[in-house]
């Protein structure tokens, strides 16, 4: 099976099953390095540019878009993506795509692709309004573009959309209990992986060519865990101290709990909770690999008060969110319908208010999301501050990929007043 066949199979499966692209790609590449770079580029590229590609298909197809069979549609997307965005000869892009088409649709696929070439391989957005042009050009649902334009303005929105393509950096949090950044960089080099300090950080490195991370000796030996720099900064803003009691209320798969435990020098207690037993096991496994014995993984519903949890010095609630800050990792999120995410602020506020019950006087409460949406971020923090006068908002930050380098992310830190 060649690279294009593998990409076709993944795209068909993603369309029919709704599976996340990163999981499909990891599964496909496991143990098969042949054409890895090409497969990754084409599969992610088609997924990232789906709305743009479909706009072009609608322009050049004589068949109603909704009547195009799934396999044929994926082939058209693959062919147009290669023609428009990859350094591949037009003849090769067309011929190799047509070869994969069922006999009944070879002529149709060939006709659409060649019509696109004859017209100069251009994207025609004439007739669309300003938001519609941004939506088609950057392949993002119009309701998201409209929301971002309202929250951040048109210029900022276009910068956010432009930065939503391509693979994000892979950040590793150094397990400072057992090594330092230089040790980790050396050990990764021994594994054949190049890494460098992130802005001279002692606790974060950027892995420049990471493949098969879980198979690396440095990973198996617990020298690091993968965590985006935005998330690492959030943990640092929580400012846990040695000996503290900390609660991470929506913890799985555990990255923030691990960083908090490392910031505490593995001294104190981190209650790391999640709703599902299977995800709690991931926390236990990760803490065990890293040698963080102060992490106590447990099943708990973040929205319901748990009498078994103690008062804590730090409570972190990284709530379920729309994920609009991680669309470089999961581009499918760009195509979600607005009503799929409409109820999130209610859930988020409920979790934050419940988390506040665990904070001791003088302690800190941290609210965070991996989304860029003021309704889920600043608005929730402001509402909480207005309704809970016993808490002071002492820090808040929004991270944007195009300026900060990591995932889109938001956190707010509150301090509970002493009685």
Image: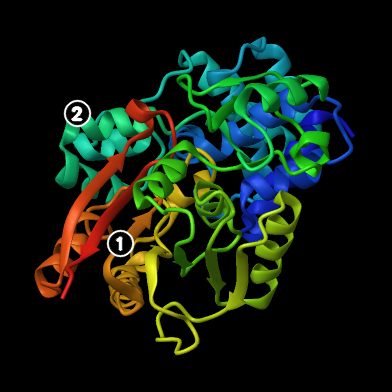
* Residue 269 or residue 33, whichever sits in front: 269
Tag 2, which secondary structure?
helix
Q: Is residue 122 above or below residue 326?
A: above
Residue 261, given in percent of the width and then of the height, sits at 55, 54
Residue 339, by quadrant, is bottom left
* Residue 173 or residue 102, whichever sits in front: 173
Q: How is the image coloured?
A: rainbow
Q: Residue at x 46, y 13 (%)?
A: 120
Residue 125, given in percent of the width and then of the height, sits at 31, 29
Q: Residue at x 62, y 70 (%)?
A: 297
Figure quadrant of the C terminus: bottom left
For the residues labelled 2 and 1, the Cα–Cα distance comes to: 35 Å
**Which residue is labeled 2 in the image?**
155
Residue 218, by quadrant, is top right
Q: Earlier in the sequence, mark 2 or mark 1?
A: 2
Determine crowd level at label 1: few under 14, some 14-19, many 20+ residues with C-alpha closer than 10 A: many
* Residue 240 or residue 56, whichever sits in front: 240
Determine crowd level at label 2: few under 14, some 14-19, many 20+ residues with C-alpha closer than 10 A: few
Figure quadrant of the N terminus: top right
Judged left or right of residue 11, residue 129 is left
Judged left or right of residue 43, residue 319 is left
Instruction: Report whether residue 103 is seen.
Output: no
Residue 310, given in percent of the width and then of the height, sits at 44, 80
Q: Is residue 193 above or below residue 382?
A: above
Instruction: Report whether residue 83 is seen.
Output: yes
Residue 193, by quadrant, is top right
Tag 1, which secondary structure?
strand
Disc ID at residue 364: 1
Q: Residue at x 22, y 53 (%)?
A: 374
* Residue 136 or residue 170, whichever sits in front: 170
Disc ID at residue 265: none
Residue 196, given in percent of the width and then of the height, sits at 59, 19
């Amino acid at each position: 099976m060649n690279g294009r066949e593998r990409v076709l199979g993944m795209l068909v499966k993603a369309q029919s099953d709704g599976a996340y692209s990163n999981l499909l790609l990891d599964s496909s590449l496991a143990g098969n390095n042949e054409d890895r770079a090409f497969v990754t580029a084409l599969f992610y590229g088609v997924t990232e540019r789906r709305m743009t590609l479909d706009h072009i298909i609608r322009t050049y197809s004589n068949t109603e878009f909704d009547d195009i069979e799934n396999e044929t549609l994926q082939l058209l997307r693959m062919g147009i993506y290669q023609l428009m965005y990859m350094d591949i000869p037009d003849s090769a892009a067309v011929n190799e795509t047509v070869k994969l088409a069922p006999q009944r649709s070879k002529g149709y696929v060939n006709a659409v692709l060649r019509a696109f070439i004859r017209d100069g391989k251009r994207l025609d957005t004439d007739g669309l309004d300003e938001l519609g042009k941004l939506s088609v050009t950057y392949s993002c649902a119009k309701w998201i573009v409209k929301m971002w334009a309202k929250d951040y303005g048109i210029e900022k929105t276009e910068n956010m959309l432009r930065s939503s393509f391509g693979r994000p950096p892979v950040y590793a949090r150094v397990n400072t209990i057992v090594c330092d950044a230089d040790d980790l960089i050396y050990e990764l080099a021994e594994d054949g992986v190049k890494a460098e300090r992130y802005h001279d950080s002692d606790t974060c490195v950027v892995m420049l060519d990471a493949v098969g991370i879980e198979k690396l000796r440095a990973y198996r030996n617990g020298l690091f865990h993968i965590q985006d720099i935005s998330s690492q900064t959030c943990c640092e803003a929580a400012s846990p101290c040695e000996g503290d009691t900390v609660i991470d209320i929506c913890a799985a798969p555990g990255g923030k709990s691990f960083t908090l435990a490392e910031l505490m020098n593995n001294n104190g207690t981190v209650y790391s909770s999640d709703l599902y037993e299977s995800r709690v096991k991931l926390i236990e496994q990760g803490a065990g690999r890293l040698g963080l014995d102060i992490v106590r993984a447990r099943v708990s519903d973040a929205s319901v008060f748990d009498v078994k949890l103690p008062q804590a010095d730090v409570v972190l609630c990284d709530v379920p969110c729309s994920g609009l800050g991680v669309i470089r990792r999961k581009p499918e999120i760009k195509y979600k319908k607005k009503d799929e995410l409409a109820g999130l602020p209610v859930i988020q506020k409920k979790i934050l208010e419940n988390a506040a019950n665990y904070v001791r006087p003088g302690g800190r409460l941290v609210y965070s999301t991996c989304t860029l949406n003021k309704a889920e971020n600043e608005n929730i923090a402001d509402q909480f501050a207005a309704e809970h006068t016993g808490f002071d908002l002492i820090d808040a930050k929004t991270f944007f990929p195009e300026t900060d380098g990591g995932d889109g992310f938001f956190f707010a830190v509150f301090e509970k007043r002493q009685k």
